Image (cartoon, rainbow, N blue to C red):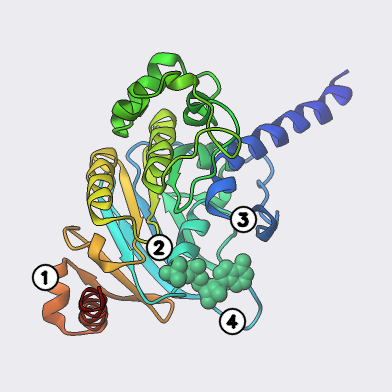
């Protein structure tokens, strides 16, 4: 009988792993782009997150032979702290997030959470510990409540309501005749970019993970919405280890620690003011962005 049940049990595990993974995978990464090359080692124990200390140790990685993207990256994110990662387009910022979520394994070096190599622990437990607020959120053709609870079916109505309030969506929900029962997605209510992002934030709050990856939207929201969302995100990241991937510098000015990725390594790090004083890559990127926004303003 055990012989019969083992495969069934494995299927269940595979199914749960896929479902769990899909919560975030669907959103941040295009599923078809993501090869299923990463599997659990036999008898992998679950990840045990005590504090949420994340460390990249000398990580080397490339998607293809002969083209290395990360060339010995070392990055330490102490438990509960927030680090903003910036760098030129294509520097590998999103790649870093994909490695932490273990869509790929480093070719050399390792990534640890509270000292445990993430390649050695059960994937489902790793993914349960990490929340991703992606650039673009996919909404399902279902109710708003379903979309918020997605990934944790057992979430109660009270938990969904609390998450909506933490994501500053409560006013929006109150104004809907059907509230959380309102249908959204392609065949329902169309949400704005900012509202969709708030749904993603609420989803993450329902999941309540100790570690967060925030992948900021590349396309600009209007600056008031952006400021409001950044404010909400600051609240959400409070007390959680957070890696913010910033594709624009304007959003990281207030971050305590900014890490500049270039040439596959950490090129510089510090606060905005410290990095400006260094007069290096960050200062260059900042000057360029300032000039661009001034030009855009002049053109208006
Ligand atoms: P941006 O700020 O423009 O989003 P990024 O720093 O997040 O850039 P990544 O998305 O991490 O950059 O990509 C780093 C490099 O890896 C890029 O040169 C990209 O072309 C390459 N790359 C990304 N995904 C894949 C993939 N699935 N297969 C092959 N190459 C990839």
Which residue is denoted by mark 2 in the rendering?
218
Q: Earlier in the sequence, mark 2 or mark 3?
A: 3
Q: Disc 1 to disc 3, how far (Cα)?
A: 36 Å
Identify the residue at horizontal 60%, vertical 33% (top origin): 141
Which is more foreground, mark 2 or mark 4? 2
Where does the image place residue 170, in percent across and percent down from the top left?
Answer: 31, 26
Dot 3, crowdedness within 10 Å: few (<14), some or many (≥20)? few
Q: Is mark 4 within 8 Å of ligand 1?
A: yes
Q: Are marks 4 and 1 in contact (CB under 8 Å)?
A: no
Q: Earlier in the sequence, mark 2 or mark 4?
A: 4
- The quarter of the picture where the C terminus appears is bottom left
Where does the image place residue 91, in percent across and percent down from the top left?
Answer: 43, 75
Asked if residue 114 can be seen in this view, the reply is: no
Which residue is denoted by mark 3 in the rendering?
30
Which is more toward the observer, 270 or 179? 179
Which is more foreground, mark 2 or mark 3? 2
Where does the image place residue 194, in percent across and percent down from the top left?
Answer: 36, 46
Asked if residue 157 can be seen in this view, the reply is: yes
Q: Quadrant of residue 287?
A: bottom left
Q: Earlier in the sequence, mark 4 or mark 1?
A: 4
Which is more foreground, mark 2 or mark 1? 2
Residue 175, placed above or below residue 247? above
């Amino acid at each position: 009988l055990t012989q019969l049940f083992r495969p069934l049990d494995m299927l269940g595990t595979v199914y749960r792993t896929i479902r769990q993974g899909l919560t975030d995978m669907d959103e941040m990464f295009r599923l078809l782009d993501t090869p299923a090359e990463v599997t659990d080692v036999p008898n992998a124990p679950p990840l045990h997150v005590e504090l949420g200390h994340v460390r990249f140790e000398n990580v080397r990685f490339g998607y293809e032979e002969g083209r290395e993207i990360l060339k010995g990256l070392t990055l330490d994110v102490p438990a509960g702290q927030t680090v903003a990662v910036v760098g030129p387009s294509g520097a590998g910022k999103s790649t870093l997030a994909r490695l932490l979520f273990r869509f790929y394994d480093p070719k050399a070096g390792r990534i640890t959470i509270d000292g445990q190599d993430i390649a050695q622990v059960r994937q489902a437990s790793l993914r349960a510990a990490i929340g991703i607020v992606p650039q673009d959120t996919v909404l399902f053709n279902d109710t708003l409540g379903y979309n918020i609870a997605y990934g944790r079916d057992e979430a109660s109505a009270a938990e969904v309501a609390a998450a909506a309030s933490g994501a500053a969506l409560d006013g929006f929900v109150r104004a809907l005749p059907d509230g959380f029962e309102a249908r959204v997605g392609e065949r329902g209510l169309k949400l704005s970019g900012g509202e969709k992002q708030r749904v993603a934030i609420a989803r993450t709050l329902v999941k309540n993970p100790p570690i967060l990856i925030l992948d900021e939207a590349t396309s600009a929201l209007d600056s008031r919405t952006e400021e409001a969302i950044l404010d909400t995100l600051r609240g959400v990241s409070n007390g959680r280890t957070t890696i913010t991937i910033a594709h624009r510098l304007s959003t990281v000015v207030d971050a305590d620690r900014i890490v500049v990725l270039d040439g596959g390594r950490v090129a510089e790090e510090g606060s905005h003011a410290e990095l400006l004083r260094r007069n290096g890559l960050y200062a260059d990127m900042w000057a360029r962005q300032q000039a661009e926004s001034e030009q855009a303003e002049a053109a208006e």
